[in-house]
Amino acid sequence: MKLKANWDGLGIITSVACAIHCALLPALLSSLPIFGINIIHDPSFEWFMILLAIGIGIYALKHGYIKHHRNPLPVLIFTIGAIFLIAKQFFRNYETVLLLLAVTAIIYAHFQNYRFCHKSRCSSIHHTH
């Protein structure tokens, strides 16, 4: 049995995990520094999550664009989201707004890529019902 990775699904999950880390952990885990644990605003962890989300996104969107649909819209939307995601690291006063814009754009880009991939002629040839 051959397993096929759903890179757009993984991209959405990664984006949501990043959003949870950035938005909810500060509220839920504000007492961790008392115990010497601080992952809430750890720059290394935040950059790791950003690079992971962008890396998975690039792979998923490149694959969908080249092999299935050739529609640049998901790539454009993802790029905007990635810019917002990186910008939130430098504009801390706007971190929450930039994060919400980033995650929304990245999830929407993956959704559109997934949709375009499954609507493509190539995809319908391989998945006859």
Image (cartoon, rainbow, N blue to C red):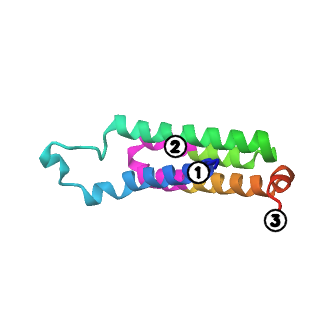
Specify the amino acid type for callout 3. Answer: His
The image position of residue 34, as x and y in percent, is: 12, 48
The residue that label 1 is drawn on is: 106
SS category of the residue bearing label 3: loop
Residue 79, placed above or below residue 21: above
Answer whether labels 1 and 2 touch (C-beta < 8 Å): yes
Mark 2 or mark 3: whose residue is earlier in sequence: 2
- Residue numbers of the magenta segment: 82-103
State which mark lies toward you, 1 or 2.
Answer: 2
The residue that label 2 is drawn on is: 53
The image position of residue 60, as x and y in percent, is: 64, 43
Specify the amino acid type for callout 2. Answer: Ala
Q: Which residue does the image show at 47% across and 51% down from the upper left?
A: 99
The image position of residue 57, as x and y in percent, is: 60, 43
Predominant secondary structure, magenta span:
helix
State which mark lies toward you, 3 or 1.
Answer: 3
Q: Is residue 47 magenta?
A: no
